[in-house]
Amino acid sequence: MRIGKVSALALAGAATVMVAPVALAQEARQFDLPSQDLGASLRMVAQQSGIEVIAPTDLVAGHRAPALKGRFLPVEAVSQLLRGSRLRAVLVGSTLVVQRDDAPQEQDLAEGDGMILVTGTRIRGSGPVGVPVITIDRKAIDENGFSTTQQIVQSIPQNFSGGAIEGTSALITSAGNGNVSRGVGVNLRGLGQNSTLVLINGDRPPLGGFSGTFSDLSVIPASAIERVEIVPDGSSAIYGSDAVAGVVNVVTRNNFRGAESSFRIGTADGDAQEYQFSQLFGLRWSSGNAVVAYELYHRDNLSADDRPYISDDLRPFGGGDYRGNYSSPGTIAAGGVNFAIPRGQFGNGLTAAQLTRGAVNRGDGWVGADILPEQQRHSLFVSVSQDLTDNLRFYARGLATWRKFDVAVRSGTDSRRTVPVTNPYYVDPIGTRLPIGVNYSFVRDLGNERYRGDVLAYGGTAGIELTLGSWSVDAHGTWGRQVERYDYLNRVNSARLALALADTNPATAYNLLGDGPSTNPATIASIRGYTKRRWDALVWSGAVRADGPLFALPAGDVRLAIGGEYREDRYRDRENISYTSTLGPRTNALTPLPGPRIVKGAYAELRVPVFGEAMAVPLFRRLDLSAAVRTEDYSDFGSTTNPKVSLAWEPFGGVALRGSYGKSFRAPGVTELRQDPDTFGHFAYAVVDPQSPTGMSNIMVIRGNDPDLGPERATTWTLGADLKPDALPGLRASVTWFSVKYRDRIASVASSVTNYLINRDIYAPILTFNPSAAHIAELFASPYYLDLAGIPATAPILAIADARTRNLSIVKQTGLDLDLQYDLRLGGGDASIGGTATYIFGINQYLTATSAPVDVVDTVGNPIDLRVRGRATWTKGGFGAALFVNYADGYRNRTTSPEQRVSSWTTFDLNLSYSFQQGSGPLKGLRVALNASNLLDSDPPFVSYVVGTLAVGFDGENANPMGRFVALQVTKSW
């Protein structure tokens, strides 16, 4: 289904997210209230602050409030008044609602002192200045029918699915190396999964993938999430490394009370069924609370056989035939000629006359492979909070997840096999009596190659929080470990196969000349090889943080947050066993990963209210400034300091303007810092040289990792406006322009060696012309010299090419984020329409600092220019309905010639629910929801996606092959 860009933008609004208002209850006031009736104190806070406070009389009757003296934000003031009352305040929009502490709600203002700590700032009680925060809360999670954490994050237009996704490798996605265990990362702005920082309750978890290449969202159970906060802006001044594109903070349900049981079952075409069960328990007492949550999740595999466009043969869709030469029956290669082996026979008595000269049997590598793996996950979450004194609180949280995966993949070991003349099934098509080669697929013999393994992730945080007047001090430690293991099964053991092919006994020899399994099952079993791998990641950290007011200005308190952190990251290769080329299992050398990495950091953040409403300055109803700086010292590459400055200006009611400027960075990965002998070497090579009289020149190519590798650095800008007009209650709009200049990106141009002298201007930064004879002689004599091309040491060398992994490339990206929502009464119920959208003006990539830019937006393997998710919801009583529309704009496919235009793609999601209200007897607290994703079962747009010898008929980074998925969920609150 196609929708134009203008129509798509018209759908933009707050579909599944809310952008935190810039000035929501953020103005501190001076209070001096006596100890009195609680209702009277709450009324005085409402009158003096201007914020609406709803406190039912029957709740506050009989409660006495303590004296309140000092300068507080409204939420702080109300929290202080409610201490010890078994009441709490919930922030609903811009209104504070007082309710019983045992109410089945989870939007507490805080875990202890009523202060909100929002992602993007370390200052409690307010959101970050000048930066929108995308919040997907528990209500939105249920309303959208999300069952996994990755679905939550992938729903926002700012996220690009390139990188670590479940279908990585199987779907030829980019930047998915190291994700054999089929985890799921997040990739804001498409700048790379390692350029988005993921936090759990504000702290870093251990990273997933080999050597920690991404944060694995799949280990976080969705049922334990209270909300997900996303800041799509550089935030290294607050959080340190990796926060270039932004931050994703998963906040767990630390304040849940009661019990909640939930069961979900779903299915898609192709028997990809999903089951989910969760159980939560929450207990509160006068001085603390505890929460325990368990979740079981299982989803079956989705086979490529169930999606016709997942094939190497794309001719039915208007593409080419990219099937390979490996099949069963196979193809004989002899004397430089191919001979197709006939079908319908088992290789017994096969003659040369039965072969088809000059023909090739082709095979589809997708047959039997999976698009998505089978996944099963067990997760346990525990949270405890206990007041030790009136101003000292202890808290601890822990999360443990065990995830199993099993996925059939395309063969990675296809190669021509040699059949000796001694093989009883040998056929000589050209009469030379010499060994023949056979291109043969072993899938029908051994089954598809498959990855089967598990991921064990566990860790926790424990700390204390001290309240000193209006200041809060937090000290805590975090420890986490993630262990990944897999078995790569059904591989061909080449050593065992060679023996079986040389066997002269027809009963036990391997037969490659038949159609399908034509060999003794015991012989087939004897060549079944495997690889076993295991590694882990370990992180532990300690942090001390403090924040509070410094002094008062007419517009409010100047507030400061300061802190220091210490972190150790360690990545270890634990096991590497192969049984693919030897007669017995072989224990291989482990990859020597550098470490541990020790990081020491310190930061400060200052918030200054310059103008406030009470000052009555024309065109300056409110003006806030924020400045932050963070410095970090890394044990393996050095130090870096990153500032950020933000501004929020409200000239008059209903209009707020904002902006931010900051520096961010990404620390090099541990594999990029390796300096062991396995990572470096150099060789002489002859390449095309347009300036040479012979047309060719010799160069010396140096490969490995630059020992002086430094961090990737980025400069980010945002400008935005938030509109909430008084003349049109219920309307909220937001627009944000963003710019990212990402320089010193770590890259290697080793694969482009043949172009070095053809495009001298592009590769000038890595070329050193006319090197000295002594230097060249030294390189030839080095033990790390690789004689790949047979070039003698006496040959002239025109240049040395430094093709090591180094800080080389630049990326510049600009775009707009749009958010729109309109709430209204409709048909006796509450309705909301709106949506969110991201439009990217351009993504200019510079291979080197001297190369011309290439705009990659709107091309296969990169973000598309426009994504929209719109919504319309309606609730009345216990009934709720939500309709969502997802739009992905059309783009270009440059992996084929001529270039292909890819159509836009529109899908719809529907969620219907009913919650039984008070007076429903045993059904009280029961919620039944029916969810349909891709309601109309719209196939992804056809993309002739060809990479090397692989092909597929859709773009796995910009589309989802699941099709219509229908799920029923039943939730009971006790």
Image: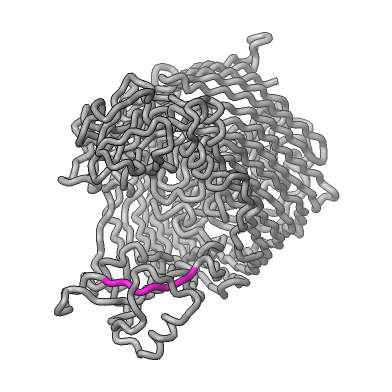
Image-quadrant location for residue 550: bottom right
Q: Is residue 308 visible?
A: yes
Q: Is residue 833 visible?
A: no
609 vs 5, left or right, is: right
617 vs 107, left or right, is: left
Residue 711 point in image, percent of width and height: 49, 69
Residue 585 point in image, percent of width and height: 62, 45
Residue 876 point in image, percent of width and height: 48, 18
Q: Residue at point 45% right, 36% down? A: 409
Judged from this view, the residue extending furthest toward the top is: 921
- Relative to 970, say whether 848 is above or below: below
What quarter of the picture does the N terminus occupy?
top left
Q: Which residues are magenta?
A: 680-686
- Relative to 799, say whether 577 is above or below: above
Residue 70 point in image, percent of width and height: 69, 58
Judged from this view, the residue extending furthest toward the right is: 389
Please state which of residues 779 and 129 is positioned toward the viewer in this rendering: 779
Image-quadrant location for residue 589: bottom right
What quarter of the picture does the C terminus occupy?
top right
Please state which of residues 968 and 663 is positioned toward the viewer in this rendering: 968
